[in-house]
Image (cartoon, rainbow, N blue to C red):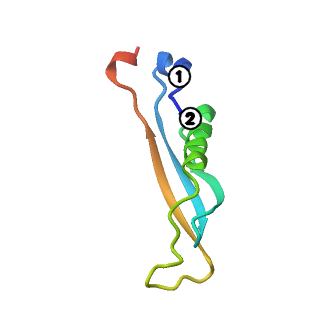
Amino acid sequence: KLSYPLSLQMQGIEGQVKLKITLSLEGQLLSTEVLTSSGSRELDELAIQAINSAAPFHGLEDSSFQLSPKSLSVIIPIDFKLRSAFQP
């Protein structure tokens, strides 16, 4: 289980990470790239860990459309927001 780092909670650090992930048609994670940093290396790494822990994904090989090449890239925004109780 991934959790928001306590040290960042105590500092009120929030942010959004935009990741580009590339998947095979079978749902295997081929690559993960940070397109836009949250401003915190720890939050960026936590976002990558979240994607890695969710893999493999549902495959697309049985879909009614054909993809070429044999992979799909998507951009995923991941927001790190604190409840007001943690903000200084």
Q: Secondary structure at mark 1?
A: helix
The quadrant of the image that shows the C terminus is: top left
Name the residue nearer the viewer: 64 or 38.
Answer: 64
| Residue 8 disc label | 1
Q: Residue at x 55, y 18 (%)?
A: 7
Q: Residue at x 60, y 42 (%)?
A: 49
Can you give x and y, in whole percent of width and height, for residue 54 in the image?
A: 54, 49
Q: Residue at x 63, y 55 (%)?
A: 32
Can you give x and y, in whole percent of width and height, for residue 43 in the image?
A: 56, 35
CB under 8 Å between discs 2 and 1: yes
Q: Residue at x 53, y 33 (%)?
A: 1
Image height of 69 relative to 59, above or below:
below
Can you give x and y, in whole percent of width and height, for residue 23 in the image?
A: 59, 65
| Residue 28 disc label | none
How far is disc 2 from disc 1 in space, using C-alphas? Answer: 9 Å
Name the residue nearer the viewer: 65 or 73.
Answer: 65
Q: Amino acid at mark 1?
A: Leu
Q: Residue furthest left?
A: 84
Q: Amino acid at mark 2?
A: Leu
Name the residue nearer the viewer: 57 or 77.
Answer: 57
Q: Secondary structure at mark 2?
A: helix
Q: Residue furthest right?
A: 30
| Residue 43 disc label | 2
Can you give x and y, in whole percent of width and height, for residue 67 in the image?
A: 54, 82
Image height of 12 relative to 53, above or below:
above
User: In terms of sequence position, does the residue under pointer 2 or pointer 1 come before the other?
Assistant: 1
Image height of 62 relative to 38, above or below:
below
Crowdedness of circle 1 by 10 Å Cα count: few (<14), some, many (20+)? some
Q: Quadrant of residue 42?
A: top right
Image height of 56 relative to 73, above or below:
above
Crowdedness of circle 2 by 10 Å Cα count: few (<14), some, many (20+)? many
Number of numbered markers: 2
